Amino acid sequence: MTNWPQLSHAYGPAADLPAQLERLASAPTPESWNDLWSALCHQSSVYPASFAALPWLAGVAGGQDREQAGNALALAGAIMAGVDQPHGAGDVRAEHAADIAVLASLADARLRTAEDPAEYAYLLEAVLSFEGVAGWRETLAQGLMNEEYEVTCPQCAAELFLVLGEPGFFSCTGDYALSDDTTVVETRPLRPANPADLTGIGRRLHDLARTDEQQTVARALTHLFGQATCPACETSFSVEARVNAGTTGFASGRGSAAEPDHAPATAVGFRDHLGPAPEELGE
């Protein structure tokens, strides 16, 4: 039995959380999910009550309502992305191992039936969160779905946009979205990796996307694990290395391969996903 009053969320003691979960279960609305995100994963911060809610989220994720299951997986994935924060909840991976395993299995199974590239990318990110792959679990979907990452050049420290999607596949030093007939932003094309040459987490993610017939995501991944050139100094660099810089970790699961753990870079903007985005919530 969870002692909710002894736990905390973004706004203090979590004594109100059981009633909030009950209301959400009986009459789910975007507003009620927004309120739950705000309490449990406020601006990406997590709390002891966040992890105590994982069993409830796993139950919803395993239910028949596809929309609510997606919301639960998205929130649970975001919570697990913050597992390394100083949340004071102890060894949550050990304490909630069974629920995390259920969530990982449900997210992996749902990949095969994802309805669009946005849902697919966020499910990939959730799977990495449940498995404990740092860095990508916080930046993968945001960057892919917003079609850009913001990084610095490893040589001259220029601030760069790395664009991968409908606008094209290129690097630039200015805001390409503001370019017009009088203002031309200098760009350099990104050079995608050969899928046959991908290794580790890059190979795993690309193979999953191809297997699940998510060609848009698969193509973007070849550029994410490819090469870029800085327009300011012409230095070539690995896109993946600039998006993530790191220490060591491992991925497991369907198509798994060991891969370095990473600290997150900045994924620019935030596309609406399966549930309310914490960055969109007020203080």
Image: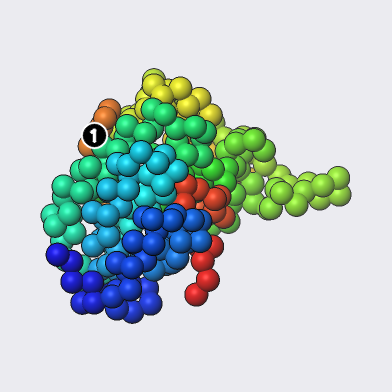
Q: Is residue 169 above or below residue 153?
A: above
| Colour theme | rainbow
| Residue that appears at 33% across and 57% down | 79
Q: Position of residue 265 (x, y in %)?
A: 44, 54
Front residue (pair 199, 147): 147
Front residue (pair 186, 32): 32
Amino acid type at mark 1: Gly
How many circles with numbers are drawn on the protein? 1
Q: Quadrant of residue 41?
A: bottom left
Q: Left or right of 233: which side holds 102?
A: left
Q: Position of residue 167 (x, y in %)?
A: 67, 38
Name of the residue lying farthest toward the right: 182
| Residue that appears at 37% across and 73% down | 10
Crowd band around label 1 with a 10 angstrom C-alpha radius: few (<14), some (14–19), many (20+):
few
Q: Is residue 97 visible?
A: yes
Q: Is residue 192 visible?
A: no
Name of the residue lying farthest toward the front: 26
| Quadrant occupied by the N terminus | bottom left
Q: Left or right of 159: which side holds 250?
A: left
Q: Quadrant of residue 61?
A: top left
Q: Position of residue 163 (x, y in %)?
A: 59, 42
Q: Position of residue 63 (x, y in %)?
A: 32, 42
Q: Is residue 85 above or below residue 114?
A: below
| Residue that appears at 46% across and 22% down | 213
Name of the residue lying farthest toward the bottom: 12
Q: Left or right of 170: which side holds 282?
A: left
SS state under label 1:
loop
Front residue (pair 250, 14): 14
| Residue of label 1 | 253
| Residue that appears at 18% across and 66% down | 2
